[in-house]
Image: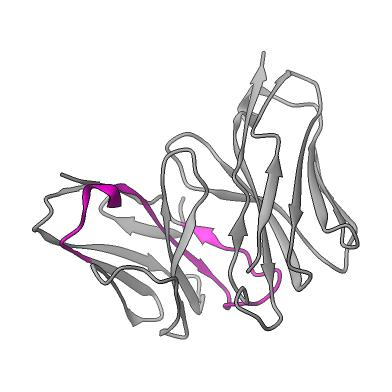
Amino acid sequence: DTEVTQTPKHLVMGMTNKKSLKCEQHMGHRAMYWYKQKAKKPPELMFVYSYEKLSINESVPSRFSPECPNSSLLNLHLHALQPEDSALYLCASSQQWGLGNSPLHFGNGTRLTVT
Amino acid sequence: GENVEQHPSTLSVQEGDSAVIKCTYSDSASNYFPWYKQELGKRPQLIIDIRSNVGEKKDQRIAVTLNKTAKHFSLHITETQPEDSAVYFCAAMPNAGGTSYGKLTFGQGTILTVHP
């Protein structure tokens, strides 16, 4: 069983659509992450939330808008995406941000296709 | 920021052989080094990790070694099995100050194929 749950598993959206990706964890972790992964490439960090506050934004375009409603939930709101934004979007959590030996637990990801 | 280089990009072995994947990192403040396995269409899964105060760690057929002076670490898989076939990513994370603080930087990945 995956301890980090992401919905939906697949998403196809047009460039004018607005959609949201959702992530949930119940491990009591206080850090949550969004990563983007293109085929045959490593995950690339997008955002880090620590104790529900945005700690890192890796210069991500504003068409991606993260939200952390509480310590268990993480959303990624999408608007006016481009075809090159098509990728696997991975959510992850860890016990604390920046804590050595605090492994990331990844969800199964949302496969996003922008048409 | 941190830069992690991983070699080889592809590795093909016969079942029962050993496999070794090597990574180097640039930021001397990095002190946490996990390895992830990602099967096709699935999420990255942590298989082993090591902290910089430890030189070697072993878990059954998997071991990781760390040379902090040389800034390199390696994954060793013994007695490989077809189910070990996957993409393996090394990563490094600094926990001291700097622009890379708290960021897990991944290597480019190694596609491991174990032939029966």
Q: Which quarter of the picture shows residue A103?
A: bottom right
**Residue A28 as seen in the image, left or right of residue B57:** left
Q: Where is residue A47 in the image (x, y as percent from the top left)?
A: 42, 71
Give the quadrant of the N terminus of chain B. bottom right
Residue at 20% of width from left, 58% of height from top?
A: A81
Residue that sits furthest to the top in the current view:
B116
| Nearest the eye: B87 or B98 | B98
**Residue B57 as seen in the image, left or right of residue B101:** right
Q: Where is residue A78 in the image (x, y as percent from the top left)?
A: 21, 64
Residue A30 visible, this angle: yes
Q: Where is residue B28 in the image (x, y as percent from the top left)?
A: 79, 70
Residue A10 visible, this angle: no
Residue at 29% of width from left, 64% of height from top?
A: A22
Q: Where A20 falls versus B56 (above or below)?
A: below
Q: Where is residue B109 in the image (x, y as percent from the top left)?
A: 60, 42
Residue at 49% of width from left, 53% of height from top?
A: A43
Q: Was residue B37 drawn as part of the magenta stretch in this picture?
A: no
Give the quadrant of the C terminus of chain B. top right
Q: Was residue A96 drawn as part of the magenta stretch in this picture?
A: yes
Q: Where A38 falls versus A4 (above or below)?
A: above
Is the image coloured rainbow, by chain, by secondary structure, or in one colour? one colour
Q: Where A112 falls versus B14 (above or below)?
A: below
Q: Give the range drawn in magenta.
A: A78-106
What is the total number of numbered labels drawn onto the structure image? 0
